[in-house]
Image (spheres, coloured by chain):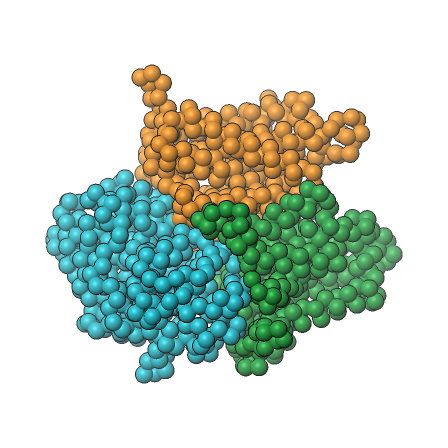
Chain colours: A cyan, B green, C orange
């Protein structure tokens, strides 16, 4: 306990240590640092810390003062943290946000204060479409895009009949409607399960067995993914019916699969906008240094967070640190003139990326660690479908 | 909807019911005898799961992990009883609810500090990991059959303990008349500690059994605790027999709801409406069941005598 | 209430309310404008806690599903706003009516039971409403429902603009005082005597020919509507409502506020809400593992400070029976 407080005090002292001459840019970064979902938040924090290290704590002429806020996996708490960042800490911009509900609750607080808001993960359709805002940016993707890419993969694989299992909440429904939008075969079964309480899929898996489809599509983020795949194996379905996933297997869950000896995960296919082995200098440096520093592969959450910092840096440099000129700052952000770990991308009219989506496959790296490896691009220069509803 | 599917779903329902019973048994014992409401009962479920995962990793064997985790969870239960719970018996239910709510917060945070936020999984021995062919063209997970078997054995053991032993006699006596047992010169404090520890170990055992299927995770206790509370309320608080029957009923209703409700709804409404209503209804199913039972029998199905 | 003014408790209570009343001036003056928001939240939760205290503190009905009314009122506002109805004169009464109706149905069933059964069945109804929110695709499911415009109060040319932070603050303050006064009037009426009597000895009340069921149900509905007032304010303040608002830990926290402040005391719940929210804000500011402190704190309050803040401040005149 004392250690924690001491660490907090030390960190605060560090942040507060006066560096003369240099002016500051204050950035608030809201993510989940408590509850089981902290596994994701911690990964993002690691990436942000690494990015700050790589840029030497400076963006152009400005020294970076970064303040983390914990949303406690709860929209109201997230909004309160955001309020404190805006009203008490007086940050210049706010970034982060894993969860759509936290972002939706917090966005008005930032935007009404006339500040820039950058989502490092959450991409709810409202903010991509009708409720898009000139000061809101997203550096990840819109929820529907990744499953749309998966629908394409399914078509290419010649899957004719598909069974869908996903949690019964907003993101779960987005994933399902996304895959339904591009998948050309027949959907022979669909179960929407109680989120987040249901972690036993015995009943659903029995139904899958009875229907015997060509493929099963699932979306289970966080700790649910390993649990589902383990039960899939125990039910005797692994190897019989191929499993297609989105946001279920990532660098946070793969070590757990490996620890549990679930060899069946190797070779599984998923879609994503990025993979740790993508071949560009920025990504190589990011992944190598992340692994050297933390001993594990970065997740896509980490990749997006790392990009967030470099995006902000590019804009601050372009306007030579004059961040009070919000219009110039925004215009510089819109250019997305930085080296992204996913390769170059540009922002659409709604400030969501227009980018490629790739198929990724689970493989063993040269040291025997399980990771994901990029395959063909499935969707090229893809823009989300809500952009047309955005008046920007 | 084939016959094999119905049988398989029945097995799934029974398996869920058995897990619920392991949790509900301790909960209902503690309530029946000490008149104590324990929201932190789910924490023992979680602690048991994390212990089993850690010990299984150390020993490299799931069964050995459980064998070590059981006494460890029992010890945690006894310590909690001695330190915090003991002084609460004389208080009212509100104090119980609040203090144990505090325990829940504490345990969740403690587990996060000790094990980290990621959770832990357990690797099953090869013989248990996979499925087996049963008659009638049914394939079923071996491990789930093991859960059913282990749970039934514990239920039988509890039955013998309560009905055939001296401590069981005291438990029964305590459930119907607490003061009388004390008046007879029984060391009631000791009895309470033992029962609380036993309840904790049973909850922990449920957590250990479920971990190879799901995984050990922070907050896993609260999710199932609410369902276990529903079970003991349906069964009649304090009745082990009631808890067993209600647990099986709840397990079956929940599983059957998830399996066949959408098909059933399709016969009375459009497919879009059924698609929306199905998941909503099946997640509310057990609460509706409880409200219905309490509407007709405000004391649950099997209210124990004298309580 | 008369002699309370001069007691230590009276002085502290008065001081706390003076701080609350002056916060819109005090906060910015101290360079902490953020605290205006914090105290708005304290007052909203205060109203909710006061409403719960009516049935829990005075009536002994431990409702573990009280947060449901916050959500029901919030969703009513949100759904009407979504449908283009922003008129507060319409929104607010409808929201309160929804809460009252829900409380009537829930109470009618739950009050047939008592003890742990009552705790559990109120929890069950709370969870049912929670899942209803999660399954409402049309209104955002668990992503929640953003409320893009506040309730409008226009009468002739005059307008009460709730977007004005200070004005909203004092509207909330007045409603808080009103709800405390309402509880004061209720518990000191004949009706309140029955409610309190049913807490200490229900059998006796029934024996003297008073059917407590109807009285308790009425109190349950009043508490539901009053909590709806907090829900309406919360929706307008946060401009967002989600199923998390009515999940069971929120109901648990609400009970904690009541107990922390001093169960069955008039001002206690407000003090409880203040201590709870300020402590939680403070702890999350200095550390990430606040629950490792918060949990044991909760247990210690139960073990050693049964009268809550209120009990620590003075005589035991209002101690629970």
Total labels drawn: 0
Against C265, residue A118 (above or below) is below
Against C123, residue C222 (above or below) is above
Rendering coords of residue A262 (x, y %) = 45, 77
Q: Residue at x 40, y 43 (%)?
A: C138
Q: Residue at x 38, y 57 (%)?
A: A176
Q: Is residue A27 left or right of residue A245?
A: left
Rendering coords of residue A383 (x, y %) = 23, 56
Viewer-nearest residue: C141 or A160 = A160
- Say if residue C88 shows up in the picture: yes
Q: Residue at x 50, y 26 (%)?
A: C177
- Say if residue C299 shows up in the picture: no
Q: Residue at x 47, y 29 (%)?
A: C94
Q: Is residue A256 left or right of residue B188?
A: left
Rendering coords of residue C199 (x, y %) = 70, 34
Question: Hey, which quadrant is residue A308 in on the image?
Answer: bottom left
Q: Is residue C84 left or right of residue C203?
A: left
Residue, far top: C156
Quarter of the rendering occupied by the C terminus of chain A: top left
Residue, far right: B184
Rendering coords of residue B235 (x, y %) = 71, 53
């Amino acid at each position: 306990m004392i250690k924690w407080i001491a660490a907090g005090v030390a960190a605060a002292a560090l942040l507060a240590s006066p560096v003369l001459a240099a002016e500051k840019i204050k950035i608030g970064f809201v993510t989940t640092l408590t509850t089981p979902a902290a596994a994701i938040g911690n990964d993002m924090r690691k990436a942000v810390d690494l990015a700050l290290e790589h840029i030497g704590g400076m963006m152009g002429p400005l020294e970076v003062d970064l303040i983390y806020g914990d949303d406690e996996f709860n929209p109201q708490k997230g909004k309160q943290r955001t309020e404190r960042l805006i009203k008490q800490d007086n940050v210049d911009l706010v970034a982060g946000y894993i969860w759509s509900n936290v972002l939706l609750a917090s966005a008005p607080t930032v935007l009404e204060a006339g500040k820039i808001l950058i989502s490092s993960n959450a991409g709810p359709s409202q903010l991509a479409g009708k409720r898009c805002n000139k000061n809101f940016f997203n550096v990840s993707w819109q929820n529907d895009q990744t499953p749309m890419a998966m629908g394409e993969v399914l078509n290419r694989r010649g899957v004719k009949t598909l069974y869908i299992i996903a949690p019964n909440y907003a993101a779960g429904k987005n994933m399902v409607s996304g895959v339904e939008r591009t998948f050309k075969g027949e959907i022979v079964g669909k179960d929407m399960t109680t989120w987040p309480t249901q972690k036993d899929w015995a009943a659903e898996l029995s139904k899958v067995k009875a229907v015997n489809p060509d493929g099963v599509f699932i979306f289970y983020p966080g700790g649910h993914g390993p649990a589902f795949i383990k039960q899939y194996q125990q039910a005797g379905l692994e190897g019989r019916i191929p499993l297609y996933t989105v946001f279920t297997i990532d660098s946070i869950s793969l070590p757990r699969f490996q620890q549990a000896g679930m060899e069946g995960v190797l070779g599984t296919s998923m879609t994503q906008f990025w993979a740790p082995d993508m071949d560009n200098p920025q990504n190589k440096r990011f992944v190598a240094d992340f692994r050297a520093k933390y001993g594990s592969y970065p997740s896509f959450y980490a990749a997006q967070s790392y990009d967030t910092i470099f995006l902000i840096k590019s804009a601050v440099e372009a306007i030579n640190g004059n961040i009070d000129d919000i219009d110039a700052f925004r215009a510089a952000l819109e250019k997305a003139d930085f080296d992204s770990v996913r390769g170059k991308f540009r922002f659409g009219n709604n400030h969501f990326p227009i980018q490629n989506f790739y198929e990724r496959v689970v493989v063993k790296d040269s040291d025997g660690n399980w990771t994901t490896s990029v395959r063909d691009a499935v969707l090229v220069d893809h823009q989300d479908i809500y952009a047309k509803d955005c008046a920007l | 909807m084939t016959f094999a599917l119905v049988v398989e779903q029945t097995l799934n329902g029974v398996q869920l019911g058995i897990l619920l019973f392991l949790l509900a048994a301790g909960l209902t014992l503690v309530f029946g005898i000490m008149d104590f409401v324990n929201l932190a009962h789910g924490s023992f479920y979680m602690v048991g799961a994390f212990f089993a995962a850690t010990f299984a990793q150390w020993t490299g064997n799931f069964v050995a992990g459980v064998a070590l985790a059981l006494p460890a969870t029992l010890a945690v239960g006894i310590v909690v009883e001695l330190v915090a719970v003991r002084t609460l018996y004389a208080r009212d239910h509100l104090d119980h609810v609040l203090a144990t709510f505090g325990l829940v917060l504490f345990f969740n945070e403690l587990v996060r500090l000790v094990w980290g936020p990621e959770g832990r999984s357990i690797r099953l021995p090869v013989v248990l990991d996979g499925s087996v062919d049963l008659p009638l063209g049914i394939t079923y997970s071996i491990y789930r059959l093991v859960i059913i078997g282990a749970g039934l054995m514990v239920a039988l053991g509890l039955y013998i303990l309560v009905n055939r032993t001296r401590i069981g006699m005291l438990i029964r006596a305590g459930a119907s008349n607490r003061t009388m047992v004390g008046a007879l010169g029984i060391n009631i404090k000791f009895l309470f500690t033992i029962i609380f520890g036993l309840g904790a170990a049973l909850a922990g055992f449920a957590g250990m059994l479920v971990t190879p299927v799901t995984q050990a995770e922070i907050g896993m206790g609260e999710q199932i605790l609410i369902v276990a509370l529903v079970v003991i309320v349906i069964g009649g608080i304090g009745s082990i027999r009631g808890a067993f029957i209600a647990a099986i009923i709840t397990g079956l209703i929940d599983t059957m709801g998830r399996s066949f409700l959408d098909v059933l709804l399709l016969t009375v409404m459009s497919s879009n409406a059924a698609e929306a209503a199905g998941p909503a209804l099946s997640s509310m199913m057990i609460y509706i069941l409880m409200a219905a039972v309490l509407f007709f029998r405000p004391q649950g199905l099997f209210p124990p005598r004298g309580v | 209430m008369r002699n309370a003014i001069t007691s230590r408790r009276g002085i502290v209570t008065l001081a706390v309310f003076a701080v609350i009343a002056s916060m819109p001036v005090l906060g910015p003056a101290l360079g902490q404008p953020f605290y205006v928001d914090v105290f708005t939240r304290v007052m909203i939760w205060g109203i909710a806690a006061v409403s719960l205290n009516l049935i829990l503190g005075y009536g002994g009905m431990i409702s573990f599903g009280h947060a449901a009314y916050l959500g029901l009122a919030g969703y009513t506002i949100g759904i009407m706003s979504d449908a283009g109805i922003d008129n507060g004169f319409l929104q607010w009464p409808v929201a309160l009516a929804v809460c009252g109706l829900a409380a009537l149905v829930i109470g009618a069933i739950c009050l047939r039971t008592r003890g742990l059964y009552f705790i559990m069945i109120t929890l069950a109804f709370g969870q049912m409403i929670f899942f209803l929110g999660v399954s409402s695709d049309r209104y955002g499911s668990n992503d929640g429902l953003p409320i893009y415009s506040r309730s409008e109060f226009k009468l002739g040319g005059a307008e009460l603009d709730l977007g004005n932070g200070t004005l909203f603050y004092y509207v909330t303050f007045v409603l808080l005082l009103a709800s405390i006064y309402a509880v004061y009037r209720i518990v000191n009426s004949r009706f309140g005597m029955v409610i309190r009597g049913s807490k200490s000895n229900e059998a006796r009340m029934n024996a003297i020919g008073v059917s407590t069921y109807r009285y308790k149900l009425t109190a349950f509905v009043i508490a539901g509507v009053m909590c709806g007032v907090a829900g309406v304010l919360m929706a307008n303040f946060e401009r967002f409502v989600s199923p998390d608002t009515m999940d069971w830990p929120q109901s648990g926290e609400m009970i904690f506020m009541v107990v922390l402040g001093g169960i069955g005391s008039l001002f206690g719940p407000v003090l409880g809400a203040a201590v709870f929210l300020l402590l939680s804000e403070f702890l999350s500011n200095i550390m990430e593992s606040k629950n490792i402190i918060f949990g044991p704190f909760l247990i210690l309050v139960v073990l050693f400070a049964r009268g809550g803040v209120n009990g620590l401040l003075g005589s035991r005149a209002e101690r629970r029976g």
